[in-house]
Image (cartoon, coloured by chain):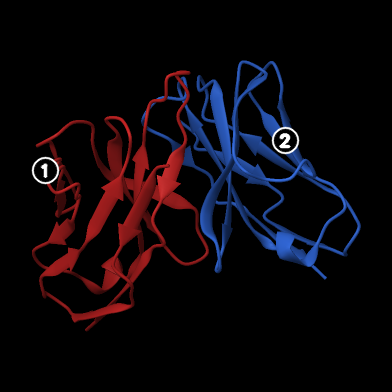
Chain colours: A red, B blue
Amino acid sequence: GDSVTQMEGPVTLSEEAFLTINCTYTATGYPSLFWYVQYPGEGLQLLLKATKADDKGSNKGFEATYRKETTSFHLEKGSVQVSDSAVYFCALSDLKDTGRRALTFGSGTRLQVQP
Amino acid sequence: KAGVTQTPRYLIKTRGQQVTLSCSPISGHRSVSWYQQTPGQGLQFLFEYFSETQRNKGNFPGRFSGRQFSNSRSEMNVSTLELGDSALYLCASSLSGGNEQFFGPGTRLTVL
């Protein structure tokens, strides 16, 4: 079945440091890929997405490129801020023969940014 | 446009009781999905409803059920609660079950 693997946290960085959170996936079809962010006490917010190979999703300074050859969707940001401290989830959505979709999530990576 | 709303935000129940959680999707969205989030198992898909029909189901026991109303609002029910049902239950809506799902703030259920 489908699965998503992301690096374990917590990831602790100083403000303005470069961020990379690794994400790899396994899927039988041609999935769409997502990064969601969860702030303390809140639900998930869609951060960015990519629907086909070589697509780059970007939002709020975050970027991720859909790499089919390496089955990866790594999240990057050039300069993190304290306000980026949150848990980040990589996810995929694969269209099944039945036309049904559900999100499969990675385990989440907690990011802590220190001033 | 108002986002996805979930009620209640917090619930405390005891083992053996049942509970009903409610989700109102974004206006115009017809698909509602439910997810369970726990520290041990992470985020797991429960089920999806579209046009009042369950269209997709995750690997959860029959104690977990749901329904959707004609206005796309959805409820999920958990019967005979167990300690392991303590979790954050998240609802997500999308236009037609497509790629982009928008999540509500969740209902935190504690089973004592």
Q: Which amino acid does label 2 sit on?
A: Glu
Which numbered mark, 2 or 1, is in the foreground of this view? 1
Answer above or below: position of B91 versus B81: above
Say which mark, if any, is on residue B17. Answer: none
Question: Disc 1 designates what residue?
Answer: A69
Residue A6's image quarter? bottom left
Residue A93: image x %, image y %?
A: 37, 36
Out of B98 and B108, give the one closest to the viewer: B98
> Residue A113 placed where, x, y %?
25, 77
Q: What element carries label 1?
A: loop
The residue closer to the viewer here, B74 or B97, is: B97
Left or right: where A22 falls relative to B14: left
The residue labelled by disc 2 is B75
Residue A104 position (above or below residue A83): above
**Image coords of residue A84 (percent x, y):** 27, 66
Element under disc 2 = strand
